[in-house]
Image (spheres, coloured by chain):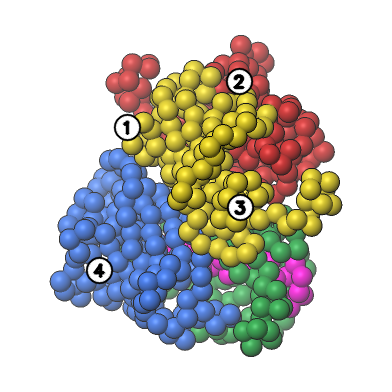
Chain colours: A yellow, B red, C blue, D green
Amino acid sequence: MSDAGLIVDETGCQRTLGYVLDVGQPDRRARCRMEVTEAHLNRHGVLHGGLVSLLLDSAMGATASLSIDPAGKAPFLTISITVQFLAPAGPGTVTAIGQVIGGGASLLFVEGVLTDAAGTTLATANGVFKRVPQRVLSENGAA
Amino acid sequence: MSDAGLIVDETGCQRTLGYVLDVGQPDRRARCRMEVTEAHLNRHGVLHGGLVSLLLDSAMGATASLSIDPAGKAPFLTISITVQFLAPAGPGTVTAIGQVIGGGASLLFVEGVLTDAAGTTLATANGVFKRVPQRVLSENGAA
Amino acid sequence: MSDAGLIVDETGCQRTLGYVLDVGQPDRRARCRMEVTEAHLNRHGVLHGGLVSLLLDSAMGATASLSIDPAGKAPFLTISITVQFLAPAGPGTVTAIGQVIGGGASLLFVEGVLTDAAGTTLATANGVFKRVPQRVLSENGAA
Amino acid sequence: MSDAGLIVDETGCQRTLGYVLDVGQPDRRARCRMEVTEAHLNRHGVLHGGLVSLLLDSAMGATASLSIDPAGKAPFLTISITVQFLAPAGPGTVTAIGQVIGGGASLLFVEGVLTDAAGTTLATANGVFKRVPQRVLSENGAA
């Protein structure tokens, strides 16, 4: 499903975790939202840090896509990502947002911030993303 | 459940994703294994990078715990983590393993490597983990 | 020398490289400026990436100090740092500036940005800094 | 000067700081050595963290070059680097060594370790390096 720029249930991972990808905002920065429930908590009773990374990675990758594709689907691979965990997140809605800060035709530098409903910054991230050449996709039978 | 050092279905996140944490090896390095299925794939048809981060983070955090607690449960918080994505992972078993490389009473530096069943390195990670003081746990009613 | 918040020639490293640390701005964000000359260039004829890291690290560490000490000298140790290299820097003035984005009594999360005289972003950084307890300094005979 | 795989005084930065690059070892892993003196110390009286980063970056970049050029001079750019500071370094000889852990025709993942004369690990690093296409060098008049 993709309605008004919202991408829902697109992949197995997305269906498993229930996050929503919003690639329809005029600032061309993707958002990745998730309602944190018991299904996402770690042994400390807060959102698992790996899922913090996942939401940031998803928002950042889709933001990279938006830089060349209004539909936010042009494939980019995450080359590396660094995440800083500023505060724990309990149940409730959290939103990751990406921003391209540099790069060129092949590599993009993207930042991300995860906040809770009150606007508190929970985590920040930085990553290098690589555009997947169409040639490679064809070879893999994906395009 | 915890049998012979295996931690299964301990948390909501673990039940949702189905990974197993092995904290019973004599080298005191935790393993985090997962059978990658369609439920973990991203839009490229491979294991979502966020889940790569999650498996590494889990193995590294548990390895930090093992440095002071044979049960691998002494709580450590991830302060920051960097993940390098070397190769994509398709369906099959993947295993993350941690290793403490330095640190002191409060902070630990931990490395992690994710490999597939054939032994191919899929990703590497480095992180800073902080021991949760018992005092803090008491204040939060967690201990 | 320290005049109007400027720290010059304080350490051997600073004298060797010639950067200036400005800890006197009202926003309590330290700046680290350097006039890039032939003495700082790498084999590509641009500012060595290690010196990019050094300027960012210096500005970020001093910004951490400013969070608790108006003189910007309270000692903080760099625990880890990640630097993204967005654009090369030729000769001319470059300035790194830090900003605390989170943390607590012991650890601080600090960001940094390096720009050239035209305002172009050359590099960004993120790091974890740890306050040096006075106790430790005493044991080492440093305080 | 380049004798028996040793690169000395090649660049302004190298002459300023006095490190030596060894690209002549049979394992094709570059070493970057420096005699730490008062000229490299920070306000804590130890090797400046930025110089730790610089030595690691230099060894890692030269190791990337060695993967395609026995002379260790094929140009690679540092895209991003993460450094973990495990222990402080006082005066004496320190050595950074690189190792390629993955990548392809354009990007390489490289690790680095900095040790002192006693073999103590002082810092570790991970980075993404990009091969500079010959085309780009020609356009810039560098080749």
Residue topped by disc 3: A69
Q: Position of residue D98 (x, y in %)?
A: 64, 62
The answer to if B96 sits in the magenta stretch is no
- Residue beneath label 4, please? C22
Residue at 29%, 57% in the rendered image: C63
Q: Chain of mark 3?
A: A
CA gap, disc 1 and disc 3 = 31 Å
Provide the major secondary structure of the magenta segment: helix
Instruction: Label 1: state its secondary structure.
Output: loop
Badge 3 local density, few (<14 within 10 Å), some, or many (20+)? some
Q: Are marks 1 and 3 in contact (CB under 8 Å)?
A: no
> Can residue A92 be seen by looking at this rendering?
yes
- The residue labelled by disc 1 is A118
Q: Nearer the viewer, mark 2 or mark 3?
A: 3
Q: Amino acid at mark 4?
A: Asp
In three-dimensional space, the C-alpha distance between marks 3 and 4, rounded to whole angstroms, equals: 42 Å
| 4 and 1 marks on the same chain | no
Tag 2 and tag 1, C-beta contact below 8 Å: no
Left or right side of D45 for A75? right
Q: Chain of mark 4?
A: C
In the rendered structure, the residue with mark 1 lies on which chain? A
**Amino acid type at mark 3:** Asp
Q: Position of residue D10 (x, y in %)?
A: 58, 84
Work out which quarter of the rendered image holds the N terminus of chain A and state it.
top right
Q: Is residue D24 left or right of residue C38?
A: right
The label shown at residue B16 is 2
Q: Which residues are magenta?
A: D49-73
Hey, what amino acid is under mark 2? Thr
Q: Nearer the viewer, mark 4 or mark 1?
A: 1
Pair 1/3: label in front: 3
